[in-house]
Amino acid sequence: QVQLVESGGGLVQPGGSLRLSCAATKTIFRITTMAWHRQAPGKQRELVAAITSGGTTNYADSVKGRFTISRDNAKNTVYLQMNSLKPEDTAVYYCKIGTYFGDFYWGQGTQVTVSS
């Protein structure tokens, strides 16, 4: 059973930075898109950033210019560098990995809290 393990969340002041990591516990074959989603209290889960196997990225408008998604295919790992954090970025962040076979894997979530 493949699991995705996230790390890097925590409490940070507005304007600060965090780097999230998400690694698979076993090798996942034929990975396509790797992504980060987030869910704030009382809100629906939303896509934050995604990166394809070819390296094409897309971002939610709310994080463009502040967040950067990257991946290490050899390590089955995806990262999210978050800069200039705002209180409205507070949420549980989830990673998601998809494959050519139609499988999807989700991480357990990591809390990010932006507060002074």
Image (spheres, helix red, strand yellow):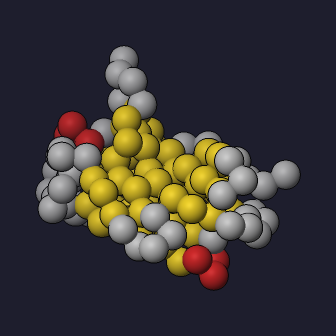
Q: Is residue 65 left or right of residue 45?
A: left
Q: Quadrant of residue 73?
A: bottom right
- Most extreme residue toward the bottom, as rendered? 74
Residue at left offset 30%, top offset 57%? 58
Residue at left offset 70%, top offset 48%? 103
Residue at left offset 64%, top offset 77%? 75
Q: Nearer the viewer, residue 24 or 55?
A: 55
Location of residue 65 with respect to 36 vertically, above or below: below
Location of residue 22 in the rendering, given as x and y in whole percent from the top left corner: 56, 61
Q: Nearer the viewer, residue 89 or 58?
A: 58
Q: Is residue 76 left or right of residue 86?
A: right
Residue at left offset 20%, top offset 40%? 87
Image quadrant where one finds the C terminus: top left
Location of residue 78 in the rendering, given as x and y in whole percent from the top left corner: 51, 66
Location of residue 112 in the rendering, given as x and y in whole percent from the top left corner: 38, 46
Instruction: Note whether residue 96 is visible.
Output: yes
